[in-house]
Amino acid sequence: MKKERSLEYEDEKLILLTQKGKMKAFEILVNRYKKNAYFIALGLVGNSEDAYDLSQDAFVKVYRSINKYNGTSKFFPWFYTILTNLCKNHLKRQNVKKRYLSQETERQKLNSEAQNSSNSEEKLEKLALKEKLLEEIEKLPFKFKEIIVLKHFRDLSYKEISEVLEIPIGSVMSRLYYARKKLKESLKDFRE
Amino acid sequence: MNCEEIKNLMMGYIDGELSDEQKSLVEKHIEECEKCRDEYKSFVRIKEVTEDMRLADLKEDIWAGYWKGVYKRIERGAGWIFLSIGAIILLAFGMFEFIKSIIFDPSLSLIVKIGIFSLTLGVVILLVSILRERLFAFKKERYRDIER
Ligand SMILES: [Zn+2]
């Protein structure tokens, strides 16, 4: 998992310090997980402003309920539940039709990529395929979308995913199988 | 190993999560079973396409200001909570005193008392509603920290 370790302190130790009112400890914790939080939210809601906002909201929520944390579970799975609940509510509220690729930033990124590449046909085809794939990921039911986000966008190991989602590794694999199968099917007509 | 059992292992194979023993099980099956071989190939393709598919990163200064943003929200949230508690206490106290004075005022008729009572209630409801709206507007303003 990509953590920005700024100190040797474990997450659980930092929470303990936060509970004692040490704001600096919470700052370290936030900086350690901000990228994970943002990119997971981005993968789930597909909009960078909302993702930024939701990820910060999740940290505020964690801070407000920091005294409820009793150390029996790890920090990140706890945080992840709070974050994804916020994302789920956001998606429900918005009844989101926004797409990853209607996002200015994503479009620009893909466009500049297209220009940088020597415009070889293969590259362009790959680009179009990416676009289609993002669209299909967005359409997946939540529990399959989240597993794709964790594996493909954050590159977590099966063990890490199973910890975060609190499911056995067998379920990680079967969810991945289902999600990828869906994507595979939707790409079938794309190739023609 | 049948096709059903190989499905999950195939995921592990693609993601490099299997033991050598499990790997050879998958390899053996794929070699023998055309259906699974085809499936395997398209899974590999999806993996390849997503491999370099990264979501757009934010600018470094936005990351640098991330903690400040979280801190501001925590602080302001606390500010609003205290403000609301204070306002509610004062409002309730004021109402109580006001209503008490009306009820015990013999020079006012019952209908006037009811009128004043209902007027006060209306003002309080409106105040609470405005306060709530203000809180909501504050939530929306937080986007300022993000470059558009
Ligand atoms: Zn088979």
Image (tube, coloured by chain):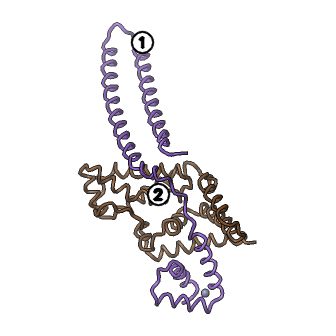
* Ligand 1 image-quadrant field: bottom right
- Judged by depth in the image, the label closer to the viewer, 2 or 1, is 2
Q: Residues within 10 Å of mark 1 (few under 14, many from 20)?
A: few
Residue closest to the far top: B107
- The residue nearer to you, when weighing A127 against A184, is A127
For the colour brown, the matching chain is: A
Q: Mark 1: is the Cβ under 8 angstroms from ligand 1?
A: no
Residue under the point 32% across and 35% down? B82
Q: Position of residue B36 (x, y in %)?
A: 62, 84
Name the residue tied to disc 1: B112
Residue under the point 53% across and 49% down? A49
> For the residue marked with disc 1, what is the amino acid?
Val
Q: Position of residue A131 (x, y in %)?
A: 65, 62
> For the residue marked with disc 2, what is the amino acid?
Thr
Q: Position of residue A99 (x, y in %)?
A: 62, 55
For the colour purple, the matching chain is: B
Q: Mark 2: is the Cβ under 8 angstroms from ligand 1?
A: no
Q: Is residue A56 above or below residue A130?
A: above
Q: Position of residue B77 (x, y in %)?
A: 37, 40
Residue closest to the far left: A20
In-image side of B67 versus B45 (left or right): left
In-image side of A18 versus B129 (left or right): left
Per the model, the C-alpha gap separating discs 2 and 1 is 54 Å
Name the residue tied to disc 2: A84
Chain letter behind tag 1: B
Residue under the point 34% across and 32% down? B83
The secondary element bearing badge 1 is classed as helix
Chain letter behind tag 2: A
In-image side of A152 versus A70 (left or right): right
The secondary element bearing badge 2 is classed as helix
Q: Is residue A133 above or below residue B35?
A: above
